[in-house]
Image (spheres, grey):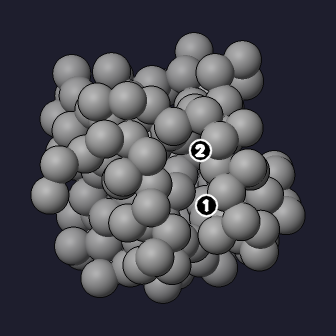
Amino acid sequence: MACWLLKTEPNVYSYADLERDHKTIWDGVANNAALKHMRTMAPGDQALIYHTGDERQAVGIAEVISAPYQDPKTDDPRLIVVDIRATCALPSPVKLADIKADPLFSDSALVRQGRLSVVPLTDEQWQRLLVMAEVSA
């Protein structure tokens, strides 16, 4: 199982929208590095949903429930999507400032490549974020 952080503008599609819909197609990714990460996603992978903009915080957990496939809204085979489903909202959202203050994330693409919309997380980083979010085991 791999772990990811997926960024979204909450005024476009928020974690609350995902909870309402139960599942969605995670689309709109065009950055080459982000698409490269998405190509390695597999069903069962876990993802933190991160609200960008004024919020700048991880707010919920989702599970990848499909292999990557071509975006059905486009004819461009380079653009891919995955299906995800809501797992749970975080009891305590994790702010970007708190992530940046933790040395464990100093080499993370979340900190080094701020505009990257699909960020891989190590198992250790995933576990630390769950602790920061007060998710019980």
User: In the rendered view of the protein, which quadrant contains the N terminus?
Assistant: bottom left
Q: Quadrant of residue 31?
A: bottom right
Classify 137 as above or below 33: above
SS state under label 2 = strand
From where the camera sits, is residue 111 visible? yes
SS state under label 1 = strand
Task: Kindly check if marks 1 and 2 are in contact, taking CB atoms under 8 A apart as contact.
Answer: yes
| Residue 15 marker | none
Classify 120 as above or below 39: above
Q: Position of residue 89 (x, y in %)?
A: 27, 32
Tell me what residue is drawn at x 17 percent, y 49 percent.
136
Q: Earlier in the sequence, mark 1 or mark 2?
A: 2
Tell me what residue is drawn at x 72 percent, y 38 percent.
97
Q: Position of residue 130 (x, y in %)?
A: 35, 53
Q: Quadrant of residue 103?
A: bottom right
The amino acid marked with disc number 2 is Lys
Tell me what residue is drawn at x 72 percent, y 24 percent.
53
From where the camera sits, is residue 72 visible? no
Q: Is residue 42 left or right of residue 76?
A: left
Tell me what residue is drawn at x 32 percent, y 64 percent.
46
The amino acid marked with disc number 1 is Val
Q: Position of residue 83 (x, y in %)?
A: 31, 56
Nearer to me, 37 or 68: 37
Q: Real-space Cα distance between discs 1 and 2?
A: 7 Å
Which residue corresponds to mark 2? Answer: 7
Which residue corresponds to mark 1? Answer: 118
Q: Is residue 59 left or right of residue 111?
A: left
